[in-house]
Amino acid sequence: MQASPGKMRTPFKLDELEPTAEITIGFKQVTELSWRQKLSLDACTDCGRCEVSCPAFAAGTPLSPRMVVQKLKGELWRVYGRGEEAKDVVASGLIEEDEVWACTTCAACVEACPVLISPFEYLLEIRRALTLEGRLDRRKSGMLTNLSRVFNPYGLSPAEREPFLRELREMGVKLVSENPGAEYLYWIGCASHYDARSREIVKSMVKILQAAGISFAILGDEELCTGDPARRMGEEGRYQELALTNIETFNRHNIRKILVHCPHCFNTFKNEYPDLGGRYEVIHHTQLIGELLRTGRLKLRKKLGGKLTLHDSCYLGRVNGIVEEPRDIIGEAVETGSFVEMKRNRRNSFCCGAGGANYWYEVKRRDRESVLRLNEALETGAGTMVVECPYCMQMFGDAARIADAEDKIKIRDIAEVVAECI
Ligand code: SF4
Ligand code: SF4
């Protein structure tokens, strides 16, 4: 099983494979699971804690992590207890494809399970087997094609980011090739390269970094997708192609510290690139801004009033344990009493619905996770929902439109809040 919810198992290394090597990845039958995986299934007490915490279950998708584990446990007993022949868990209808794809990999089930089972890891391994066989709908295969064709999941030409890169250059931002001694590589990420709203996060960060006198540079045209959406979709080869190319770029520029504002990029660089030889100091923008405020390198001229609440992103809070830094920053940037917590916060936060590559395809559901979460923010009476992830920002922006709540609540990245106070 995975070492942590943020680190998927690396089943092979693309650059070490023989050209004729046959690849097996994921599992179709329970007999293919490791003993540890089998014992883990057997330990399930059917307590239902994972189901209660699961956003996909709350949104009315066919997925219940409890049922996935119980069904696999039943299959295990059928095969090993009664000596019957193992079945393909998906082809036999035991696990539905819609269950497999509804998981946002938010890790709430892992956090909730009293016997340390990780239900979503079985789903990710089934995804790998489905993807290997090409059992993907048009949206999923289209996203993977985009990654091969234009190196971003949006499928947009890299030329589309040129005007934004020009704008950054006009703000004084240098490329790593022009500033090889820069302390930080600031990784922009696909969302902020191609989505107009997410670009505001970058502009705010540039303002903050310049105000604090931080030496940084960007990759410009050399930046490709981290590969995270391919990996979460089960396409390990496509992930590794992108990861190995990025690692080569980092090494060519002698990169040591990578600053990111996306928790998914953060997780991939920090927890997953080391398996492929890419070891860097990875810093999320909440960590750096917190440090700059603490040490006095960044000074705020004013504090914001009005009620604010904070949404902890799954891959920053629950998966990587970064929960106090954003609160410390907000404590500096808003007037006393302005900040209100949502009922579910920190490691107990509720997913926006975009994770696990769910952002890139449709899932049959009764409700949207993002709208359920937005309603929790509205219940606090806050007029601003602060986020720390460009995908959360997009999901809640859409949710506010769907819920007709755009005049009640604004969605802002934490960097935008800080930049306004400089
Ligand atoms: S990772 Fe999240 S969405 Fe997936 S099964 Fe667990 S709780 Fe549900
Ligand atoms: S929380 Fe753990 S023990 Fe309880 S039903 Fe879910 S997987 Fe089983």
Image (cartoon, helix red, strand yellow):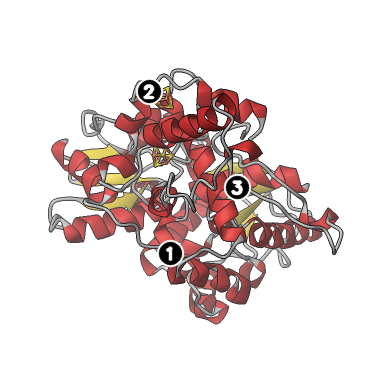
Q: Is residue 250 left or right of residue 415?
A: right
Instruction: Tell me which amino acid carries mark 2.
Output: Asp
User: In this figure, which residue is indicated by the disc labeled 3?
Assistant: 268
Instruction: State the mark number for residue 46.
Output: 2
Instruction: Tell me which amino acid carries mark 1.
Output: Arg
Going from N to C along the chain, the mark reached first, 2 or 1, is 2
The residue lying at 65 percent from left, 40 percent from top is 32
The residue lying at 45 percent from left, 67 percent from top is 137
The residue lying at 24 percent from left, 40 percent from top is 308
Q: Quadrant of residue 20?
A: bottom right
Any part of residue 381 in sight: no
Going from N to C along the chain, the mark reached first, 1 or 3, is 1
The residue tagged with tag 1: helix, strand or loop? helix
| Viewer-closest of 76 and 412 | 76
Q: What is the CA distance from the residue labelled 1 to the residue labelled 3?
A: 21 Å
Q: Is mark 2 within 8 Å of ligand 2?
A: yes
Query: Could you tell me residue 284's position as x and y percent?
Result: 53, 43
The residue tagged with tag 2: helix, strand or loop? loop
Q: What is the CA distance from the residue labelled 2 to the residue labelled 1?
A: 45 Å
The residue lying at 54 percent from left, 48 percent from top is 88
User: In this figure, which residue is indicated by the disc labeled 1?
Assistant: 199
